[in-house]
Amino acid sequence: MPEKFKLGHYQLFFLFFADLKCYRAEIMPIITEFIDDDGLKCNDAGGWTEEKYRLIGSYFKQFSTGTKKAWPHRAFIDLYAGAGYTRLRTNGKILKGSPMLALSVNDPFDQYVFCEEDRDSFEALESRARRDHPKLNVRCIRGDCNQKVDEIIRALPRRNSLGLCFVDPYNLSIQFETLIKLAGRRLDLLCLLALHMDANRAYDVYINQESSKVDRFLGSDRWKAEFVDSGRPRQEFPRFLAGYFARRMQTLGFEETPTHSMHLVRSDDKNIPLYHLALFSRHQRAYEFWDHARAASTDQRTLKLGE
Ligand SMILES: C[S@@+](CC[C@H](N)C(=O)[O-])C[C@H]1O[C@@H](n2cnc3c(N)ncnc32)[C@H](O)[C@@H]1O
């Protein structure tokens, strides 16, 4: 290639941020666009949920478009799908929830599998998916995702299929056994680790009393001795669990996910840590999408890129 056409680090850096600026201006308003109340049930959430939707919405878009040519079948799975719409407690406005964001991507997935336990949320989600995306292939399964996991897996295409599975519980209810089964298929997992919301508040119960919830979340009971023996202070408990969980995911063949690559979401009023969003993939490309989604969804005031 002639020297004049080669891009130096500076130009690449410039192009990346020019692309990012353009992406922010065009895509982000669509992801977090407020929508009209349709009278069906909505999930309730704090104002910080907008940040979650910017990040996951951006990731879903990049994943679905970036994998379209290489994979004949792409599946999207949402284990804790919710009602499809979410009402923010701060201002009463309504946003598309994770399943509706995944259905709205420019290059839709070939198969969608949504699991939701609550009956009203399940019915609202089914109605919205059918009403707004009648041509897409959507399967809604009602029940506890830990119990329904075999049915969820059976709903996925068998061959030449790549999946993206979103795991978004309110607490530490996802069981490692469930993730082992899912990891038997070719898929990436985007997990919300409710470590600060649940683990921090429930520290005394998990550490001092008989509770098997963390054992089931981590698929092991060895974490307790490791934490207690290390003499770490209580405030390090969530970070310890995040690291432990990432190590357990590595045993399933996923790339190493250091805690600093997890995206920490804080409450908007008191700036208190709430949860981490963590990607687990077997492909380096997925982490490139993730980095881009993180950069694109981060508040411009935080990045101070300048206009
Ligand atoms: C945080 S909300 C999910 C919101 C949705 N993912 C979104 O971002 O728009 C968690 C949802 O999981 C449902 N849920 C709770 N436990 C569940 C379980 N074991 N299996 C499936 N769904 C469950 C709840 O009813 C609730 O609607």
Image (cartoon, grey):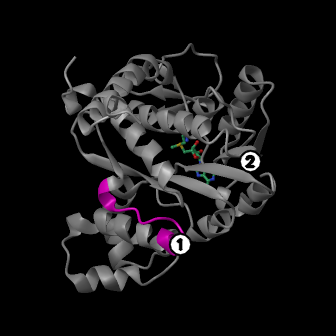
Looking at the image, is 122 positioned above or below residue 190? above
The residue singled out by tag 2 in the image is: 142
Expressed as whole percent of the image width and height from the top left, the position of residue 25 reads 39, 17
Residue toward you, 11 or 265: 11
Q: Does residue 160 show up magenta in the picture?
A: no
Is the residue marked by circle 1 packed among few (<14), some (14-19), or many (20+) residues within 10 Å?
some
Picture residue at 68% right of the left edge, 32% below the top: 108
Question: Residue 48 is drawn in which quadrant?
Answer: top left
Kind of residue sitting beneath label 1: Arg
Is the residue marked by circle 2 packed among few (<14), some (14-19), or many (20+) residues within 10 Å?
some
Query: Would you say the magenta stretch is mainly helix, strand or loop?
Result: loop
Residue toward you, 9 or 157: 9
The stretch of residues the image draws in magenta is 249-260
Looking at the image, is 236 positioned above or below residue 6? below
Picture residue at 77% right of the left edge, 30% below the top: 136
Expressed as whole percent of the image width and height from the top left, the position of residue 174 reads 55, 61
